[in-house]
């Protein structure tokens, strides 16, 4: 491996350790000295190295993680706003309101109400036309395992992106997928398993953290979701509860996939696009 590539991959591994520390407990803000020590950098150089590989500062990463966890709590629980604010590390409800409004366009209480209203409307409006049967080609992914609540898989993608950036693998044609191996309604959150992956060329052999994951060609039902990732569970409810019983289709023995179609760091949550793929059994010719 050329010296420059070796050096970049070493930096990526070190930055990934700092990102993992940030993701361990988003309610806590590690000091600059702590993050630099975890990454084996001098505090004088850590910020520049972090930003060069991730495209954001550690403070921006932490804020994004906090608000992602907050959106999930608002969408899926009835916890009071003050409790949600404390859970994700805000010192006051006022500070939480300001940060959430800046990112999501509305305050957290209004967001929770909108999610509930949208969920009720979607349950009544889902039609067969919302879902497309599509053939997903074979995928060759560099993948990282994620264990724990599915809402936390973004941290695995952060580390994966740093790994790929160091190797020049973040290209216009790169696609980003997650595979979800368990049902979050029946498996305890701490035991949930998922895989975060991005496509890599045929000559790339992942090392230094990710492993190669080859996904076979799949016939799938595809439903496109626009909006925060915290609301993706609604897409599954629509697929399984409204579309599947009327479709005449049977699920295949393969986990569902999600493909993330745009960059959540560059766009507001209301513009995030995700394709949810439900693998289906092959049709038997009559």
Image (cartoon, rainbow, N blue to C red):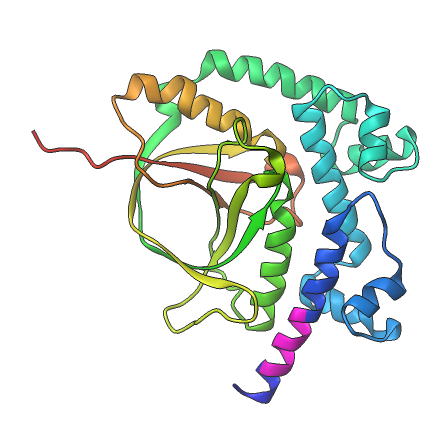
State whether residue 228 appears in this view. no
Residue at 40% in and 17% down: 242
Q: Is residue 143 above or below residue 270?
A: below
Q: Is residue 148 above or below residue 203?
A: above
Q: Is residue 37 magenta?
A: no
Q: Is residue 7 magenta?
A: yes
Could you tell me what secondary structure mostly forms the magenta stretch?
helix
With 170 as the anchor, is 109 left or right in this view?
right
Residue at 14% in and 33% down: 284
- Residue placed furthest toward the left: 286
* Viewer-proximal residue among 181 and 238: 181
**Residue 86 in picture, x, y percent from top left:** 86, 33
**Residue 140 in picture, x, y percent from top left:** 39, 60
**Residue 133 in picture, x, y percent from top left:** 30, 34
With 16 as the anchor, is 286 left or right in this view?
left
Q: Quadrant of the C terminus?
A: top left
Residue 285's image quarter?
top left
Q: Is residue 207 above or below residue 135?
A: below
State whether residue 10 appears in this view. yes
Residue 131's image quarter?
top left
* Viewer-proximal residue among 92 and 225: 92
* Viewer-proximal residue among 133 and 195: 195
Q: Is residue 132 above or below residue 27?
A: above
Residue at 58% in and 81% down: 5
**Residue 253 in picture, x, y percent from top left:** 32, 38
Give the residues in magenta. 6-13
With 222 as the anchor, is 236 left or right in this view?
right
């Amino acid at each position: 491996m050329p010296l420059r590539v070796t050096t970049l991959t070493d930096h990526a591994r070190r930055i990934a350790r700092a990102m993992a520390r940030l993701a361990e407990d988003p309610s806590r803000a590690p000091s600059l000295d702590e993050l630099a020590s975890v990454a084996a950098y001098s505090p004088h150089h850590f910020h520049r190295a972090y930003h060069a590989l991730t495209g954001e500062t550690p403070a921006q990463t932490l804020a994004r993680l906090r608000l992602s966890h907050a959106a999930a709590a608002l969408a899926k629980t009835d916890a009071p706003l003050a409790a949600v604010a404390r859970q994700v590390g805000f010192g006051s409800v006022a500070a939480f309101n300001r940060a959430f409004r800046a990112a999501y366009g509305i305050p957290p209480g209004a967001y929770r109400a909108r999610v509930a209203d949208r969920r009720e409307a979607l349950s009544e409006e889902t039609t067969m036309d919302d879902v497309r049967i599509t053939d997903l080609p074979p995928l060759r992914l560099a993948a990282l395992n994620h264990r724990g609540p599915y809402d936390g898989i973004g941290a695995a993608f952060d580390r994966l992106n740093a790994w790929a950036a160091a190797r020049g693998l973040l290209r216009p044609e790169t696609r980003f997928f997650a595979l979800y191996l368990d049902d979050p309604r029946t498996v305890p959150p701490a035991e949930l398993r998922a895989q975060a992956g991005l496509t890599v060329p045929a000559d790339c052999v992942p090392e230094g953290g990710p492993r190669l994951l080859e996904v076979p060609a799949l016939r799938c039902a595809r439903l496109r979701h626009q909006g925060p990732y915290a609301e993706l569970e609604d897409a599954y409810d629509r697929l399984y509860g409204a579309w599947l019983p009327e479709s005449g289709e049977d699920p295949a023995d393969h986990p569902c996939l999600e493909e993330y179609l745009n960059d959540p760091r560059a766009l507001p949550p209301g513009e995030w696009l995700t394709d949810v793929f439900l693998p289906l059994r092959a049709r038997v010719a009559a």
